[in-house]
Structure formats: structure tokens, C-alpha cells
Amino acid sequence: MALLIAWPTGQTNARVDPSELRSLFPALSQVTYLNTPTAAIAAAPVLEAVRRAEEDWASGRFDWLGWEADAHATRPLFARLVGGRPEGVALFASVAEAAATVAASLSPGRIVVGSREFRSNLFPWLDLDRRGFEIVEVPASDGVVSTEAFCSALRPGTVLAAVTEVQSSTGFRVSLPEIAARCRQIGAQLFVNLTQSLGALRFDAEPCGADYVAAHGYKWLLAPRGATWLWTRADRLDGLRPLAPSWKSVEQPFTDFYGGPLRLASEARRLDASLAWFSWVGARAALSLLASLDAEVLERRCLGLAADFRRAAADRGYRLAPAEVPSQTLALAVPDPEALRTRLSERGVIASVRGSWLRLGFHAYNDESDVATALEALDADAVRGGSQVAGT
């Protein structure tokens, strides 16, 4: 007997006023959370969705088809965020899986990637060396790979450039339009990783000229870890095949689970990995929450808070990581960032360390009080004798 699944259309919640967003994050009553670049704190609607799934699981009356449907419902929600069509969205567990899927489709040639890329968007491309590709790692200066440096490495013969809009270690944001324009000039494909920006910053794949857009959801998209999306431009989709063909790869995966033949689905969902259900239950709630917000207002809030902190930190003598395009994430160069992170945590200010940098990020659930609290904690630490200003 065939199993039927009713795919949801991805309706979103009622509009949410950004000023009310903060109240949906219980952790903010206890801490000043500036560590979204590592992982977002849980929103109440996301927690509620996951807990409801757990309760259904515990009762023995759960509907796994409903959980599958939640995952499918994220396709139009993600497509809306990147300015693409739902038919071009595939579901994965990690950016590394998404990048490796694209990498497997390429004909040998020249690959350009930043030397300071997070490894999920680095190693799938470096691994192409064993297939005869020429891999060019764009060198970093002062911890960042600039737009100019990246574009200078894009020469004829490049088959693909892989770039992250906001670099993980420092929050440095490249100019994607410039990189995309250079890719078009030389006929190179462009893979964009938006894990450190989408959900806070707006993006539109078509005018950007991106061929592939990937993002893991557990940071700025507010989802649980384990939900990743890959959008592929329509004219590139035919060239992609699943890394691990499975029961999910066919046109009607829910009608029969046994036997062949293998006939791949025409849409990007043929690339789907098998799903960790609870991650996707939470992911649907998270993307629905983001869809209820005005993206322009959200971006302005994130960038404004980060800019306010950056100016105030610079006035206090801190050296900040280089900046080119406004970003919602920033980093302070300090002599002992781990010690400072620990002392800030004791004061309820949550940040992270990447190398010699203390890294902070501002999402729309943050507000001006978080900027003030973090600066007060830095000031108090300096007065106590733990001054971390570089060069002091």
C-alpha cells in the first residue's frame, strides 16, 4: 500500500514586531548573549516545536511523515531568504555535505577558495586535488581574506570560486557583488556559504549571480544543529547527482521503499540526505519565525548594534579586526582572549574566541542594552586590572 504525504506550503506566522523578538528568547533574561556566530540561543517557538515532537515520540503516537513534511516545508522558506525557487533547494546535515555534492559534479580545472575559510567550506574543495584540480588558496592578511585579494586570484581557467560572505574567525565581510561580477567575467561558477550571515543579512541569489548557495541553520537562522540547505541555480541543477543515492533520491520516495530502478527526481530534492527529524521540526519553526520579520529592519538592527559596539570599542583603544563591508560580527585583538572571555562570562556576557581574537556577534534579538552591558564589562575588567587592550 502506498504511503501518502501531504507536503505543506510553508505558510508563515503572523508578522512579528522586531521590538517584540527579544521576548521570545528566554536565555536573554539571564545572559547577554553575543555568541550567535557559534550557535544561536533557542527561540520559544523553536523549543515548543521540538518539545512537541519529543512528546509525540514518547507517546508512541508520533507521525514521522509529519516530521518529513516539516523538513519539506523549509524549502520555500529558505528559497524566499535567498531569492530563489523552492524546486532548487536540497536538504543536508552540513555545509560540508552540500559543498562536496557540488565538488563531485565539477570537471577538472582551477578552484579558488580563501585560506581562512572554515573547514566545512574548505576541505571539500582541497580534496579535489586528488582528482587533478588546481587548488588556489587566497592568502590572508591580518587574519582576513579581502575582496581585492580574492578577486585577484580569479583568473581564466577557474571553474569555481567558493567564498563565505562573513568570515567565521573575525566577522570580516566580503563584497559578494564584486566577486560575483569577476566570476561572470571569467566564466567561473560561484559557491556562496551564508552560514555566518543569512538570517541577519539579506541576500538575493539572482542579482548576485551565485550558482550555489548553502547555509547551516544553527547560527543566524535560529534552527537546531543538523539542518542545512543548498540552493542551486536552475541551469546548474542537471549537473548535480546525490553523493549517496538513497530512498529519498527518487521522484516519489513515499510510494514504495523497496527495489529499483534508480530514477532520480527532477528537482533538487533528489540530492537530499536522510533527515534527522527533530532538527527539521525545529528548523521549520525557526525559518517561519524569520519569515515573520521584516528582513530590512532586521538587517539594519543587526548592523547598527555591531557598528555602535565597534565605534565604542575603538574609542576605548581596542584594535578590531579589519572591516570592509559592514558586518554584524566583529572581533577584538587582545593578548589573552580566552582569559578575557572567561571573565566576561562570569559577568554574564557570552562571547567566543578564535585564535587571538575575541569574537562577538549581534542578532536582532540583541538590543542597545547588550551593547552597553558588554562595554561595561570590558570597562570593569580594565579597572580590575585585567586590561586586555592590545598594546597596553
Image (tube, helix red, strand yellow):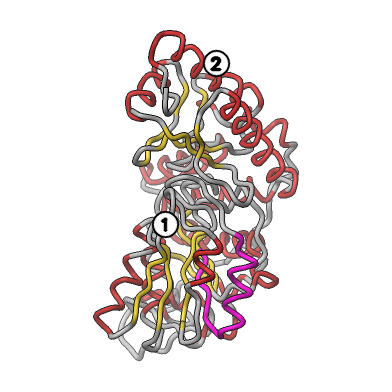
Check if residue 386 falls in the magenta segment.
Answer: no
State the quadrant of the C terminus. top left
Residue 158 badge: none
State the separation of the CA atoms marked 2 and 1.
32 Å
Relative to residue 247, is residue 144 drawn left or right?
Answer: right
Relative vertical location of residue 21 with respect to residue 377 in this rendering, above or below: below
Residue 203 lies in what quarter of the image?
A: bottom right
Q: Residues within 10 Å of mark 1 (few under 14, many from 20)?
A: some
- Residue occupying image coordinates x 24% and y 80%: 130
Residue placed furthest toward the left: 130
The tag earlier along the polypeptide, 2 or 1, is 1
Residue 376 badge: 2
Relative vertical location of residue 197 with respect to residue 152 in this rendering, above or below: above
Question: x%, y% of residue 386?
Answer: 38, 15
Tag 2: residue type? Answer: Glu
Residue 64 lies in what quarter of the image?
A: bottom left
In front of the other: 41 or 280: 41
Question: x%, y% of residue 150?
Answer: 50, 66
Residue tagged 1: 140
In front of the other: 141 or 135: 141
Per the image, label 1 sits on a secondary structure element best described as: loop
Relative vertical location of residue 370 with respect to residue 263 in this rendering, above or below: above
Q: Residues within 10 Å of mark 2 (few under 14, many from 20)?
A: few
State the quadrant of the N terminus. bottom left
Which stretch appears magenta?
A: 175-192
